[in-house]
Image: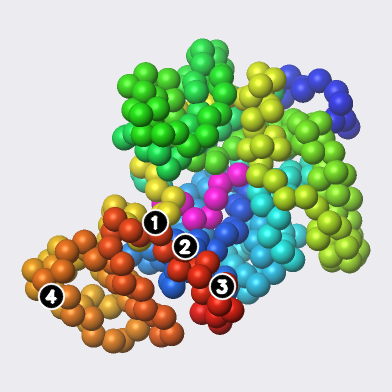
Amino acid sequence: MTTLNSPVPAAPATDPLEKFFAVIPAGGVGTRLWPLSRAAAPKFLHDLTGSGSTLIRATYDRLEALSGNNVMVVTGDAHRDAVCRQLPELSDDDLVLESEPKDSGAAIGLAAAILYLRDPATIMGSFAADQVISPVETFQDAVREAIYTAATGKIVTIGIKPTHASTGFGYIRTGASLDVPGAPSAHAVVKFVEKPSEEVAEQYLASGDYNWNAGMFVAPVELMLRHLKANEPVLYDGLMEIARAWDTPDRVAVKNRIWPTLPKIAIDYAVAEPAADAGDVAVIPANFSWDDVGDFAAIARLNNAREVDAVTVLGEVGRVFTEDSSGIVVTDTKRVIALIGIQDVVVVDTPDALLVTTREHSQLVKKAVDGLKAKGQTDVL
């Protein structure tokens, strides 16, 4: 068996695609989408595109062509039933339930540890449950390239070619082209950089050397865990203890004992950034459309959103009436909503909470959530 201290093995004789296992972290409340997205019903459980599929179902479907049923979902205990309804084909052994949020380092790290103990040659891919991507075929082509690149001993991120100078995303500085059979787009990663100022973002866009960091990683599980062990040994030890009990009757008891003690850290800081400094990270720059649906303004950008005049509507279109208005309406009730003479408005109507703001201020919705939490009004969160 490969050990975590041994050199990364050469690419196996078998097709690396046969060793691929998709991991879907499904966490986070999506507070900028309150009151639609809440602790009990986070955004990945909603259909935010009008496509008929929730975000997590759509994520599973676009990965299935590459992974088949080799899919693991990491989510909160509270979402077990909803996730199982959305993904009835998911096996119990591949549903990892968090008793409390511990950030992506623990979530993705535990998936890597479980998969490593089952088969140390596994190549895992981590893809968030709450992203909107099209066209699917272009995404799948990029993931295939990432798998072939990972098989050479790299942690691979899929970078999104920026369409504008965004200050809301982290960036990946792209280095020299890599000679990887089956992955003509593969490049080395020089470094990851934090969300920039507008001036710096303009410079990144003009240089052509930077891609948005969408948080997608494809890597040999052995290499992921080796970097995790080196950088976060306490987290690594705890995750390995849970993983060793995972396929035994002691799974729940060990997880419940260890999980609350684990440190919180993002996978970027625990693995990706140190690995990039060590020269172990590659990037596949990709041209597909990608949206993390970070606020209500994002809904208007989605391909399948419907419009009533100049108002984007999600929900009961027939119950929304407009006159000389523009903006976004998300309705989860049977109430009639009438907009008259109001521009760039955002209205979100649910049975127990109503949000009214503007598209310009939609990123500030999180402040309302924080304020309600401070006042103890958690029943609507």
Q: Disc 3 to disc 4, how far (Cα)?
A: 32 Å
The answer to which of 323 and 280 lies nearer the viewer is 323
What amino acid does circle 2 point to?
Lys
> What residue appears at the point 17 percent right and 75 percent down from the top-left corner?
339
Magenta residue span:
126-132
> What residue appears at the point 45 percent right and 33 percent down from the top-left corner?
196
Q: Disc 2 to disc 3, how far (Cα)?
A: 11 Å
Q: Disc 2 to disc 4, how far (Cα)?
A: 27 Å
Q: Do tag 1 and tag 2 residues touch (Cβ < 8 Å)?
A: yes
Q: Is residue 367 above or below residue 317?
A: above
Q: Do tag 2 and tag 4 residues touch (Cβ < 8 Å)?
A: no
- Residue under pointer 3: 373
**Which is in the foreground here, disc 1 or disc 3?**
3
- Residue under pointer 1: 363
- Residue under pointer 2: 366
> What residue appears at the point 84 percent right and 56 percent down from the top-left corner?
261
What amino acid does circle 4 point to?
Ile
Residue 265, visible in the rendered structure: yes
Q: Disc 1 to disc 3, how far (Cα)?
A: 18 Å
What amino acid does circle 3 point to?
Lys
The answer to which of 255 and 63 lies nearer the viewer is 255
